[in-house]
Amino acid sequence: MTAKSFIPILTLVLLCGCFKYPSDRLVSLSDFQDTLPKNNIEALSKMKRLTLTDARKFALAGNPDYRSAQHAVSVAKYRYYRSLSAYLPEVNFHASAGQSIRNSHDLLNPPAGIMPWENRFSSQLGLTASLLVFDGLEREFTMLAARQERCRSQALDRNAKRLLLRAVAFAYYDAVLALEQERIAAADLSFQKSSLAQAENQYRNGLVSKAAVLNFRILANAARSAILNARYRHTAARNSLASLMGFSREDLPPQLELDCRLPDDRELIPSLEFCLEQAAANRPDLRAAVLLLDIASFRKWSAYSGFLPVIRAGAGLDFTAETARYGGYSVDRSHHNTTDFSYGVSGEWNLFKGFSTFNLVREQTVRQELARFHMEDVFLKAVTEVKDAYANYLNARGQVRIYRETVGWVFEQRALVQSEFWCGRETITRLNGAQSDLVEAESRLAIARIELLKAIIQLSAAAAMPESGEVW
């Protein structure tokens, strides 16, 4: 081996040594951020208000988990296309060239055709084509299984979309709830500041003790603490929402407002029976489980093809050229060109393979039963999920009605107690209790209304309703 022959090997070694694996490249925050897709944050920055519909559109376009589910659909589609190739002929081109040099020694009465020295060069070009005629219906069932696998991947894609839209709605409503809680805490702070100013004025005039002033100062600080907690929950919810929307490198613009409007209490969801029927007809995960059962069935029938013969039709065209030089023979060279064309049908039938085909059929039969159990399990979980979501919806709707009525009463009570306190007919403890009741009732109403929206989203997702739980 010459020195020049080492050059390609040395180049290959150097290139392999300089290659940087992904695990070596992704070692810092900026490295990971550079691999993430760049979402259109400029378009989001131009918006003044982000509705739930807008947030869902951004999530469908930029969420990496959902985008991976979309690519899985493409993988299954191309696998299905590949299964169709079994119905087409297979065409191969082959070529070869070679040389052989032979020296014979100690020849004693050699037979005809044995030369002391021979140098032979030959080349061959060929084109062959074959077509599978029958393989026990294996390719048919393989194609059908691949087609159902494609449909199953589409169902899983829709299921990922269903879960993503639900997660976006939950994060969005968590942020809205935090805003509402901040508003309630700010109203409480305004009340405590107003009461504090009035208490300080009366304290200077000797009408109340300093305890009243300290009381309102303490409650004002408690309201400030509640405002900070609400702002933290709002920031956390916005961060979660931004991540679901695919904005992992950027936060949502601070000037971007969320839609805080809450719908009036109304009958938004039909009966439980209708929701169960919708789930049975539209749940993508249930559809994927049914398709998995189809796939297992096709694979079981494909296993029976091992008991049947395989028949192929083929044709081939070959061209061969050969040149030879001889030594110590009557002639010193020869040359010939040969063209061969052949066609025919071949078949084979495996009669015994150590019970391999028999056990394959048994295995696929068991896998079919496993797929059936999986489908039944998914169906039972879907029914339970719809029933739980419907019960949650009924509870949330009832809670909204109760707390809406309660807030009106508590607000009227607080106004009466406040008036009587400054007239000297009620204690400060009673006023604190009335204000605390109002804050708690407003907070519970806000939570109940958000929980109602979440319950609608949860039930709509569980029943796979076409509107996906949109309420405005």
Image (cartoon, rainbow, N blue to C red):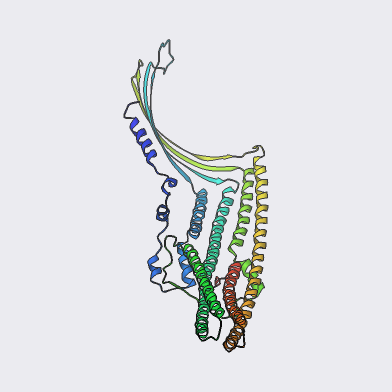
Q: Is residue 254 left or right of residue 157?
A: left
Point out the residue furthest to the front here.
206
As drawn, 468 above or below 310: below
Q: Is residue 169 left or right of residue 384?
A: left
As drawn, 341 above or below 235: above
Query: Where residue 469 appears, x then y in whole percent?
Result: 56, 72
Q: Is residue 14 visible?
A: yes
Query: Where residue 416 appears, x then y in whole percent?
Result: 60, 88
- At x 64%, y 50%, the residue is 300
| Foreground pick, 330 / 374 | 374
| Foreground pick, 319 / 164 | 164
Say which quadrant the N terminus sits in.
top left
Q: Is residue 320 visible?
A: no
As drawn, 208 above or below 62: below
Point out the residue furthest to the left here.
4
Query: Where residue 210 appears, x then y in whole percent?
Result: 54, 79
Query: Where residue 187 appears, x then y in whole percent?
Result: 51, 79
The answer to which image quadrant residue 443 occupies is bottom right
| Foreground pick, 279 / 266 | 266
| Foreground pick, 111 / 54 | 54
The number of discs equals 0
Point out the residue furthest to the bottom here.
423
- At x 60%, y 67%, the residue is 462
The answer to which image quadrant residue 115 occupies is top left
